[in-house]
Amino acid sequence: VAVVWTWSSVDYLLSCESIRKLTLKMDISNFQDFCDSVNENPEATKFKRKAKDLCQNLLDSGKLEEVINNLDSLKCNENAEQSLFKYFYNLDNVKRYLSHPVTKATKSEATSVQYREDGNKYYQQKDLEKALHNYKFSIVYASHPPHTCTVFDDNVIDDSNRSDPRLFKGLIKQKTNACAAVYYVEEGSTAYNNLAISYANRSAVLMELGQYTKSISDINRAFELQYPNDMCYKILIRKAKCLIALKKCKCAQDVLHQCYNLMEKLQLPEPKYTTIMNSLNTLKQKCHLDYTKHSATHHQIQESQSSTTSAPRNIDDNLIFAYSSPEPPKIPDCNPRIPSLSSAVQMEYTHKQGRFMAAARDIKPGEVIGVEMGFVTCVSVEDAASQHTFCCTCLNRCSSPLPCPTCAMVVFCSETCRDIGLHEFHEDECEILPAISSLGFVSNCPLLALRVLNSIPYWKLKRVVPLLQQLAISQPRSMHGFNEDYDYDSRNYQTVFHL
Ligand SMILES: [Zn+2]
Ligand SMILES: [Zn+2]
Ligand SMILES: [Zn+2]
């Protein structure tokens, strides 16, 4: 955060010759006039306020002249940007000014328990949507087994020839391997009971909402987290019910078998024991019946499906899961030079307008003319509700998400997305995300900038940025972002650099 902010401050202060003249005169009131004359946008306003405070601070401490003089000499250095950054960062006035009051979004067992109790209350009132919402937050705040990364990226510095034009090929953002993190909880451990119970409770809501697969996932998570053994029959029965609803009778039978075994060991008091055994027997019968039905003719299978399909409780409950995230469309005929666009459009360039797209032929209404993955993407950091609704890896809406194991700020739709997301960016962002969102930027630019930097190894950037800066001058502007084969590969950092 300090990097993003200080860098922009240095850049900003240096780019404004008039500021330097004004501040040299130590006349801070003129600075206000200058600020008012700069284009208005919310971020510029915030920034100007900060810049003004900083100047005032330097003036009050009698350091302004010294700083201005130092800036002048540092600006002539060979590594001007780095030395300026170092100078600013180590300047006490600036450092103090940059330290931001940050509220950390940390886990809290007490908060988790409170959310679960509220969830239980709503569940009893049959308000399933509110119950689901509260159980989600109970899971988000509960302590998790620590995340330990077991995969390391191949970040070895490549000493190949600096001037090799093929170097740019190495700037293509690779799909990283998932973290393959292991979350092992010792058998019988009670450390994550709170989390296990919250998952188990949420599985009950999901089952009632007809979300059987999601319910089974939550039950499996509860098991892995060592859900208390003496209550395991509850979630085993629930799992069997879900499997029967999904017509997986063979699997349901196995789960019931597991439950019978458990019941033998538990020695529950009467009449509890008989009640549970009765419901197990009923399920076993149902299972057997369905199994024989399904082995019958095709016609009968269809009949049984329509008769057992559970009706949605009500339309609102069903709507929670109504959002689907379809695959992006495919482009029928790609533009040979810009594969993310269709051949219906082509890039053109004029000195006055810069680069722009133009139609190469008539385009029909609704025709897909471009499909492109973002080089980096993020869920809005400004809006906490979004952070807890959309998977921060694939951006899909998720109604029964998993949180980051360390913080309480972001969620993932699945174990797969969690492992990819942690490894690709969130391991590095986890601690600083609260600071980024408290900066009060209107856009997501700081986070996106951070992700761009994070997606390319530093040694590679350091080597390649000077080359790209040269190209920016020597290459015709219509060629910016194209590689040496005249292709525009939007996964390549080159294209982002030239934006
Ligand atoms: Zn996802
Ligand atoms: Zn990792
Ligand atoms: Zn985190």
Image: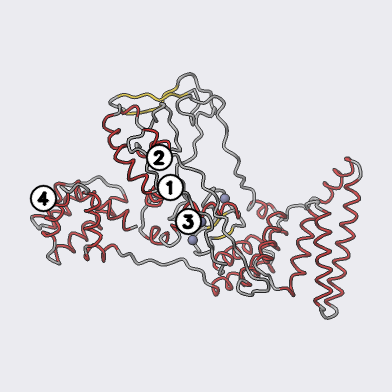
Residue closest to the far top: 361
Quadrant where the image shows the N terminus: bottom left
Q: Residues within 10 Å of mark 1 (few under 14, many from 20)?
A: some
Mark sitting earlier along the chain (1/3): 3
Name the residue beneath numbered marker 3: 426
Name the residue beneath numbered marker 2: 493
- Label pair 1/4, CB-CB below 8 angstroms: no
Q: In this rendering, is residue 181 above or below 476?
A: below
Q: Mark 3 CB in 8 Å range of ligand 3?
A: yes
Name the residue beneath numbered marker 1: 455
**Amino acid type, residue under disc 1 in the picture:** Ser
Quadrant where the image shows the C terminus: top left
Tell me the number on the disc at residue 21: 4
Mark sitting earlier along the chain (2/4): 4
- Label pair 2/1, CB-CB below 8 angstroms: yes
Q: In whole angstroms, how far apart are the C-alphas of marks 1 and 4?
A: 39 Å
Q: In whole angstroms, how far apart are the C-alphas of marks 4 and 3?
A: 43 Å
Mark sitting earlier along the chain (1/4): 4
Q: Residues within 10 Å of mark 3 (few under 14, many from 20)?
A: many
Mark sitting earlier along the chain (3/2): 3
Q: In whole angstroms, how far apart are the C-alphas of marks 3 and 2?
A: 20 Å
**Amino acid type, residue under disc 2 in the picture:** Tyr
Give me the residue at 28% from left, 25% from top. Answer: 351
Give me the residue at 83% from left, 47% from top. Answer: 305
**Amino acid type, residue under disc 3 in the picture:** His
Residue 445 x %, y %: 38, 49
Say which element carries label 2: helix
